[in-house]
Image: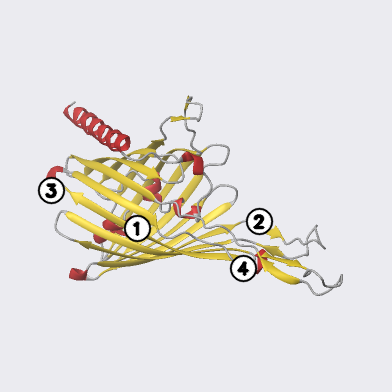
Amino acid sequence: MKLYHKIKQAAKSALIFTLLFGSISFAGDRSKYGTSAAPELLIPVGSRGTSLGGSMISSISGIDAMYWNPAGLSTLNSKTEVLASHMKYIADININYVAGAVDLGGMGVLGASLKSLSFSNNELVTTLESPDGTGETWSPTYLTTSISYARKMSDKILFGATVKVIYEQILTVSSTGFAVDFGLQYLAGKSGLKFGVALKNFGPSMTFDGSGLDQYYEPSGTPSGSTQEPRRVTLQDFSLPTTLELGISYDIPMGKKNNVQISTTFQNNNFSSDEYRFGLEYNYSNYVFLRGAYAFMPDYKTEDGITKKDQSLFGPSFGVGLQYPFGTVRLGLDYSYRITEKFNGNQWFSFTMGF
């Protein structure tokens, strides 16, 4: 009964924290849905973080932290860690992600990652002369590479940063962009309380360019049938989907081998509605992990002043993780599943190794 009240009180405090910070933050702009550059930056990776719905930015650690909050990268569980993750997204889109990090001792932790999108079905190349297809096919390219650095500023304050290079290409039109993430975590001693903040995808706008934007025309005053000259269409810039996240978590020990962690995060989006996330993780002796999470968006008002509920494409998530040491090597397998509306659910499979 005492443990039940402790969990209830922790969950209540986490809820108050999230709603309080959410209420004093700038509201997300849902009118900009689908208008940002590089929306793939918002597609999560790794089974642990996704099964917790991104609620654990204050407590995420090790190689998993590189995407969620680079500050947590400073607490590697091994000298070197690697992560490989595969995700079955919506509409036959697959997300592949690999990452590695090494502990440099007193100099901090250095990591790198690569994220790519692949499409199951290629599209036919069509032209004015061959509207049914030329026989060639094409598939868009989405790549994000990153380098991360993290360090323990003290025994309670952790800092991390990530620099990203974003590349997108559709046939002969492409764009390259740059973004940075900054993260902090504060560990409140032995109380089990942790705080976190992460600013993600901050950087200049992206512009698409390439020969695919050329339009050919005959200069005025020239005979019909003369050689056409190209004129390139100039596209507008597209801003990156920057987010600001504030989180808190609380560990509740249950004897020597069991632990329950409650986590919550408020995410402010500049290209969609804000989001409130809540997660729960059960840990048995650092071998077996059970996780679950729920996220929701607050109500919004239309231009007519009518209050409506915001509907997210994604629903609750849950997952399981296994870790086991083999000598000096620690292996981990994680799986997570997220319910989605109008599509089959998302699935993540992750493999980690520390040595």
Which quadrant, please, contains the C terminus?
Answer: bottom left
The picture places residue 124, in percent across and down from the top left corner, at 72, 59
Q: Which of the pair 238/184 is nearer the observer?
A: 238
Mark closest to the chain's N terminus, 4 or 2? 2
Nearer to us: label 4 or label 2: 4
Position of residue 244 in the picture relative to residue 186 (left or right): right
Nearer to us: label 3 or label 1: 1
Which residue is disc 2 drawn over? 121
Position of residue 194 in the picture relative to residue 135 (left or right): left
The picture places residue 134, in percent across and down from the top left corner, at 78, 64
Which residue is disc 1 drawn over? 181
Which residue is disc 4 drawn over? 210
Label 4–label 2 contact, CB within 8 A = no
Which secondary structure, mark 2?
Answer: loop
Label 2 CA crowd tier, 10 Å (few <14, some 14–19, many 20+): few
Label 1 CA crowd tier, 10 Å (few <14, some 14–19, many 20+): many
Q: Is residue 268 above or below residue 205?
A: above
Mark closest to the chain's N terminus, 3 or 2? 2
The picture places residue 127, in percent across and down from the top left corner, at 77, 62
Mark closest to the chain's N terminus, 2 or 1? 2
Label 1–label 4 contact, CB within 8 A = no
Which residue is disc 3 drawn over? 189
Distance between the alpha carbons at the discs numbered 1 and 4: 29 Å
Distance between the alpha carbons at the discs numbered 3 and 4: 54 Å
Which secondary structure, mark 4?
Answer: loop
Nearer to us: label 2 or label 1: 1
